[in-house]
Image (tube, rainbow, N blue to C red):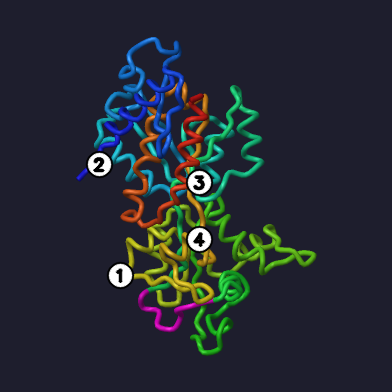
Amino acid sequence: MVKSARPAIFFLAALALVMAACGAPATTAAPEPTAAPAEPNSGPVEDQLAMYAPDAVTGDIVSAGSSTVFPLSERMKQRFEEEGYTGNLTIDSIGSGAGFERFCKTGETDISNGSRAIKDSEVESCAALSPARVPVEFQVGIDALAVTVSAENDFATDVTLEELAAIFSTAANWSDVRAEWPAEPIQRFSPGTDSGTFDFFVEAVMAPANKVDDKANIEAGEKAILESANLQLSEDDNVLVQGVEGSPYAIGYFGYAYFQENQGSLKALSINSVEPNGGTAESGEYPLARPLFIYSDASIMQEKPQVASFIWFYLDNVNAEINDVGYFPVSDTKLQEGLDAWNAAMGL
């Protein structure tokens, strides 16, 4: 059954407005949209709130970025449309870096999806736009980056971070990593350099194994993986899945959702003897757990009610959908931070 968020939003938001008008602070478990139009209190409470309901907003919403976040945003788009949104919501899967470029350099998008946090240099690019943009961050989930091999691979079940770095750089054959493994060339599949997944993998795996002045070095780690033999890069995770499925000597990494969707033909390796799952991802025990984000800008959200509406709907409903998509829910505390950021962006 499709859950409707509108009645709860309307009731709690109306309560907040009424209590504020009476001089008493509104207290709720989580802040609900207490929207005011350009002229405060210029109409009934219902009119003020209606602009944030999915079945009332119109106009386009343009989103782009992480291929990892893509299936989650696609699910939230489907839910948003089921609740009555009739505008045009586009979501392009182009990689986190390319998504931030569209958001911060060219100003083409309303929402940017990221499988990593936005970089300082990207924030600076946003500030240089005219009008300037100030990215507002919303964490929407947790991913356990899956390192996968073909289901036909009968020798690899667990690797250390150090072995994983060798597999994606200096090791030519599997037997170079462990002597008991086959003397067969390693076939490597990796997201492209515009991908936040690639950035995360370099930072978490490759940089610590490629130190400069005894410190983990991202540039050296990136160079090591890009210069490795038998490497195929793609911004399309489905291409990576197909590549890994095609050989027992292939290995690749991508978001957990893509592994979950293809479990019959893939198997996920444990890292440092820790399996990727919801418990180890949330606790941080799994070494390749990472947060998933969407970003927007306060001015965009205020000028385009449809964007504010979708972001609110996303935060309010994501935990009901995320496990089915293949990722793991954020804590109530993190969700609360997102709701607070929404209210702050809207000036509430």
Mark 4, residue position = 289
Of the two numbered discs 3 and 4 on the same chain, state the one appearing first in sequence: 3
Say what amino acid the circle numbered 4 marks: Ala
Q: Which mark is residue 197?
A: none
- Secondary-structure class at tag 3: strand
Mark 1, residue position = 264
Mark 3, residue position = 114
Give the main secondary structure of the magenta stretch.
Answer: loop
* Residue projecting furthest to the left: 1
Of the two numbered discs 2 and 3 on the same chain, state the one appearing first in sequence: 2
Q: Nearer the viewer, mark 3 or mark 1?
A: 3
Residue at horizontal 50 percent and vertical 52 percent from the top: 291
Mark 2, residue position = 3
Of the two numbered discs 3 and 1 on the same chain, state the one appearing first in sequence: 3
Res. 218 image quadrant: bottom right
Residue 57, magenta (yes or no): no
Work out whether residue 318 or residue 146 is closer to the camera in this orientation and state it.
318
- Secondary-structure class at tag 4: strand
Mark 3–mark 1 distance (CA, rounded to whole Å) = 28 Å
Of the two numbered discs 4 and 1 on the same chain, state the one appearing first in sequence: 1
Rendered-image quadrant of the N terminus: top left
Which segment did they paint magenta?
151-159
Residue at horizontal 37 percent and vertical 40 percent from the top: 316
Mark 2–mark 1 distance (CA, rounded to whole Å) = 31 Å
Say what amino acid the circle numbered 1 marks: Gly
Query: Which class describes the residues within 10 Å of circle 1: few (<14), some (14-19), or many (20+)?
Result: few
Of the two numbered discs 4 and 2 on the same chain, state the one appearing first in sequence: 2
Say what amino acid the circle numbered 2 marks: Lys
Whole-percent x, y for residue 128 in the image: 65, 29
Work out whether residue 294 or residue 246 is closer to the camera in this orientation and state it.
294
Work out whether residue 55 or residue 211 is closer to the camera in this orientation and state it.
55
Residue at horizontal 58 percent and vertical 76 percent from the top: 163
